[in-house]
Amino acid sequence: MRYQQRECQAASCGLRFPVAEASELGANCPLCQSPTIFVGEVYDTHEITERRIAAGPPVEALLDNVRSLRNVGSMFRSADGAGVSHMHLGGFTPTPAHPKFAKTALGAERSVAWSHHPDPAAAANALVDAGKRLWALEGGPRSRDLFELVNEAGGPGDPPIVLVLGHEVSGVDPRVVERCEQVVRIPMAGVKGSLNVSTAFGVAAYLLRHARGVVITPRG
């Protein structure tokens, strides 16, 4: 896809923004509705042409009543990029069946396997019984620094780690936490005590999948 930049001609505005090459969309400024003109050269967007095969353990995720459609869609896109193999969607967590899901997931809902479970606690029990290791991203007295636990995560031949993430406000159901092998946190340097749930998922998924290195191959 090729793009150009448009620039608002109002001296009090001056907004600059991208549109597809030669597109008449954006002929008027989206902020002040003044006329705009094309500026600069046409340019191409660039996609990554290599594929990175992670050397970390298999990773899945269990979402325990994550409320926001945008958060879950964003998590699917991170799951696709990190190589997360399955998304277990619990409770009222939105699923790819929602008509607006693709707006945030941008196609990742077609590349990442998923299933829905009305009771996240029952899903957690089934995952543990299947030999999978549940790691909850949560605070509390059991919580340990995720960056200090990477070496305990294992490699490709080890049982999958299921990252468990909970509701944006109330967190992970205590019944689910009880079944978790580890409770982990991402260290925070600022005044806030935690990251947005989709951001935290992306950090944790990439860390676990790639901390032991990668094998780089051409993208097929």
Image (cartoon, rainbow, N blue to C red):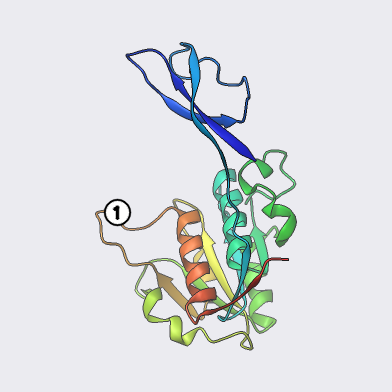
Instruction: Please report the residue visible at 36 percent of the width from the left and 18 percent of the height from the top.
Output: 13
How far across and how far down the image is residue 81, in percent?
Answer: 60, 62
Amino acid under disc 1: Lys
How far across and how far down the image is residue 185, in percent?
Answer: 39, 69
- Give residue 11's quadrant in the image: top left
Q: Nearer the viewer, residue 131 or 48?
A: 48
Instruction: Please report the residue visible at 42 percent of the width from the left and 73 percent of the height from the top.
Output: 184
Left or right: residue 120 versus residue 8 is right
Does residue 172 appear in the picture of this structure? no
Q: How many marks?
A: 1
If the image is split into quadrants, where does the C terminus sit?
Answer: bottom right
Residue annotated with mark 1: 192
> How dense is the environment of label 1, judged by Cα within 10 Å: few (below 14), some, or many (20 and up)?
few
Instruction: Please report the residue visible at 38 percent of the width from the left and 12 percent of the height from the top.
Output: 10
How far across and how far down the image is residue 65, in percent?
Answer: 58, 54
If the image is split into quadrants, where does the N terminus sit?
Answer: top right
Callout 1: SS: loop
Left or right: residue 168 versus residue 19 is left
Q: Nearer the viewer, residue 14 or 186?
A: 14
Q: Nearer the viewer, residue 43 or 53?
A: 43
Left or right: residue 1 versus residue 19 is right
Does residue 4 appear in the picture of this structure? yes
Most distant residue in the front direction: 41
Left or right: residue 156 versus residue 213 is right
How far across and how far down the image is residue 176, in percent?
Answer: 55, 69
